[in-house]
Amino acid sequence: MWNYVSIAIMAVSGALMNAVIAFFYDSSTLGIFNETYAWYMIISQITVWGIHMSVLKYVPEQDNEKKKRGILKSAVFITLLLSLCIVVLCELILIVFPGVIWKRSLQVALTGLISFSMNKVLLSYLNAIYELVMFAVFQSLRYLGLSGIIFLLAVNRIEGEYISLVFPMVEGGMSFLILFFLFTRNEIRGHFNVKDARELFLFGTKILPSNMVVEMNTKVDVVCLGFLIKSTSQIGIYSFAILFTEGFYMLFMTVRKVINPGISEFNANGRLKEYVANVSKKLNLLLWPVSLAAYILILTIYYFICRVLVGTEYNIGIFYIAVICMAIVMNGKSIIWGDFLSQAGYPMEESKVNVLTVFCNIVFNIVLIVGLGTMGAAVATGMSYFVYGVLMYKNMIRKTGIKI
């Protein structure tokens, strides 16, 4: 319940930060910001290198508290090293692309990726040790910080391409808060271990393609529009609407975060089938009614925001939301069990599923955007969830014999 409160805060904050940009600037600036945000999140999967998922896999399997803390320290060390190298490389690559309209915005945003990557590892550790209340609190604070700082930047009329300063500002503050909490809990007293670091890196490398394409799958439409549609205004309107679909998607991702540690723990104890059966029984009871209620609610909220805050030019977004969110509802179980293969010890299989899904999503987007414009992007994204659902279901049965 704490995490669902967190999701509500994230959704409201996400809507507010987009509404603030739309109010103080224009839809073109909003398009540049959301294009930057899309690339920022995609590149963040490279900078963290799957280490956060390694932490979520190995920590619940340990009974020794000292061992858990050692894994955390090893994970933080290699994440800082990897993220620093990758951020420097990305900044150098951007220098040779002078014609990209959102280049300066992304250059500014990238400076926050080192802290962001470390924060993902620290939050995964909280998830792994079942500190889900503090996990929810920190997630909420991050989004409150994003919306609050964007408001301050907008009120002070900072140039649109520098709104992305919000990312390094928020992530730096979040690093301090999470580390302070872990310090008070004596969770950062472990020792760096070369063997742990090697295992974390190897698992992270295997799961990296999966995490990369999962993040891309929620951003493929915006990225493809950035290349295929010249109007940043249309991209701004579409990306504003898509923010609501991402919030809806997070309702299912929250359940995934809650059940993930149990998958590793019960798998290590040889009781994975029992765990899946127990969780599935609860999902069968609640998933459809809750999902449909949330679906209706999110459409209503978007309609209200268009009427009151951002203007009628954004009304078309309700059709994008309706299409994508219905696809999410119909594939909700697969989304919830999306980390099953990696948590059960099959990271490469999970990567294959996600890579194939995002490949289909890219193809769908290119074809349908050319034919239908922004509406084609919404249809393509919805279709990708059905591809994912089928692939996930078949691979779970093939590798473990377990049905959801």
Image (cartoon, rainbow, N blue to C red):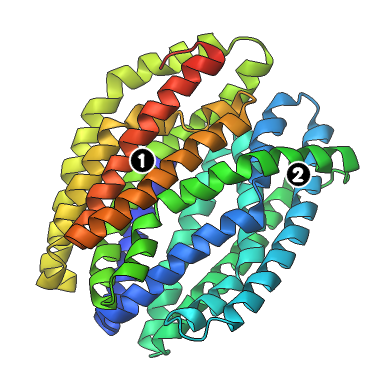
Q: Give the residue displayed 52% in from the left and 9% down from the top.
A: 274
Name the quarter where the N terminus is drawn: top left
Q: Give the residue displayed 16% in from the left and 50% down from the top.
A: 299
Can you say whether 105 is above or below 281 in the image?
below
Q: Is residue 1 visible?
A: no
The residue pinned by badge 2 equals 201
> What element does badge 2 sit on?
helix
Answer with the quarter of the image where residue 160 lies.
bottom left
Name the quarter where the C terminus is drawn: top left
Q: Position of residue 281 (x, y in %)?
A: 37, 14
| Amino acid on which disc 1 is placed | Leu
Can you say whether 267 is above or below 322 in the image?
above
Q: Give the residue displayed 64% in from the left and 21% down from the top.
A: 265
| Amino acid on which disc 2 is placed | Phe
Q: Residues within 10 Å of mark 1 (few under 14, many from 20)?
A: many
Q: Is residue 122 left or right of residue 337?
A: right
Q: Position of residue 191 (x, y in %)?
A: 88, 44
The residue pinned by badge 1 equals 251
Q: Residues within 10 Å of mark 2 (few under 14, many from 20)?
A: many
Can you say whether 335 is above or below 137 in the image?
above
